Image: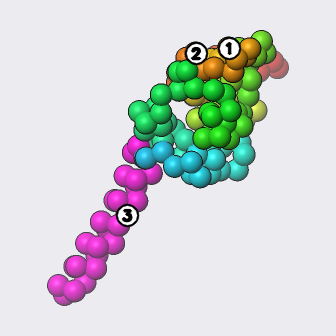
Amino acid sequence: MNYLKARLGLVASVILLSISACTSNQPFDRRGWNDGDGIDFPRRNLMVDDLLEKYKFKGMKYKNVVGLLHEPDRFSDDSTSFHYELIRKMNVLDTVKTKNLVFWWNKKDSVISDVKVVEKEYPKKEIKK
């Protein structure tokens, strides 16, 4: 009977640890940064706080950022910034929320001037009948 209780306790502990590991911050891992399917990167949001603590991006060259994080997901229309997607929530075809790690840079000398996590919620679109 004690053996069964011990095994049950062990299984419950493993499940709780797994759940907490999936929802808490994780240390930055260069390989894990791009884990995902190319559209969704589930570990990035968990790593971003550690990444920003460990690396001082202001003053860093663009090529060093790309060497660490790989190619950005997008560039702004005016090419004054680029970003890495942390979260994208969709409602069928429409984006309802994004969270990105955004880098602003001086394109002439490729030096990072600022970096921030930017969240945006989009208004719901009405469906025409």
- Residue 123, relative to residue 3: is it above or below? above
Residue at 31 percent across and 67 percent down: it is 12
Residue at 25 percent across and 84 percent down: it is 4
Percent x, y for residue 87?
A: 59, 35
Where are the magenta residues, as a range? 1-25
- Residue 123, relative to residue 41: is it above or below? above
Percent x, y for residue 7?
A: 28, 79
Percent x, y for residue 82?
A: 68, 24
Q: Nearer the viewer, residue 128 or 78?
A: 78
The answer to whether residue 30 is visible is yes
Kind of residue at badge 1: Asn
CB of mark 1 within 8 Å of CB of mark 2? Answer: yes
Kind of residue at badge 3: Ile
Kind of residue at badge 2: Ser
Residue bearing the label numbered 1? 106
Q: Nearer the viewer, residue 72 or 56?
A: 56
Q: Nearer the viewer, residue 13 or 53?
A: 53
Residue bearing the label numbered 2? 113
Helix, strand or loop status at disc 1: strand
